[in-house]
Image: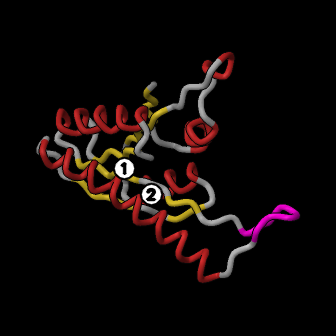
Amino acid sequence: MFKRILVATDGSTLSRKAVNSAISLAAENEAELVAVTVVPRYPKSYIEGAMTFSPDDIARIEGQWAEKAQGKLESVSAQAKAAGVSIKTTAPSSDSVADALIAAAKKHKCDLIVMASHGHKGIKRLLLGSETQHVLTHSGLPVLVLR
């Protein structure tokens, strides 16, 4: 049914559940998996009184974030390969996680997005995370949300 499945991961417990489900689904469908971790950009606007960093420091910080993202993707890749699933990984840098996920799904011609919703305490537990909500409302693809 599915030929290429995008799975979003940030390394959290809930996103690991989404990764496990996406790998199982890809194996069942003999589909390729595209694992995505979005690397945030360092904020360019500053709150009054906040510490500012030089462009070199910002580049170093963003580089560290990119390295952490690669580590998360390597773990997903190893898990997928162990299950016999073909996988590609990507770590786009973006200010908007949701927009980056939608763009990656389009770029890689995915036909399903698998991602986690994050739980909150109290009444917020009933609501989806803002990034998940954005993907659901702006993507033309089916989205499987795991809790």
Q: Nearer the viewer, mark 1 or mark 2?
A: 2
Label 2 is placed on what type of residue?
Ala
Q: What segment is highlighted magenta in the picture?
A: 44-51
Q: Position of residue 82 (x, y in %)?
A: 12, 45
* Number of marks present in the image shown: 2
* Image disc number at residue 104: 2
Q: Residue furthest right?
A: 48
Above or below, comparing residue 64 to residue 137 in the picture: below
Query: Marks 1/2: CA distance?
Result: 8 Å
Q: Position of residue 101 (x, y in %)?
A: 49, 52
Please give the name of the residue rendered at 16% of the width and 41% of the height, measured from the top-left corner.
30
Q: What element does badge 1 sit on?
A: loop
User: Label 2 crowding class (10 Å Cα cut-off): few <14, some 14-19, many 20+?
Assistant: many
Q: Nearer the viewer, residue 111 or 86?
A: 86
Please give the name of the residue rendered at 30% of the width and 32% of the height, measured from the top-left corner.
21
Q: Nearer the viewer, residue 109 or 20?
A: 20
Label 1 is placed on what type of residue?
Cys
Q: What element does badge 2 sit on?
A: helix
Please give the name of the residue rendered at 52% of the width and 65% of the height, measured from the top-left corner.
93
Q: Is residue 114 magenta?
A: no
Q: Position of residue 140 (x, y in %)?
A: 52, 43
Please give the name of the residue rendered at 41% of the width and 37% of the height, measured from the top-left corner.
15
Asked if marks 1 and 2 touch (Cβ < 8 Å), the reply is yes
User: Label 1 crowding class (10 Å Cα cut-off): few <14, some 14-19, many 20+?
Assistant: many
* Image disc number at residue 141: none
Judged by its main secondary structure, the magenta piece is loop
Identify the residue under disc 1: 110
Q: Position of residue 117 (x, y in %)?
A: 51, 31
Q: Residue 55 falls in which quadrant of the image?
A: bottom right
**Horizontal relation, residue 64 to residue 40: left or right:** left
What's the coloring here?
secondary structure
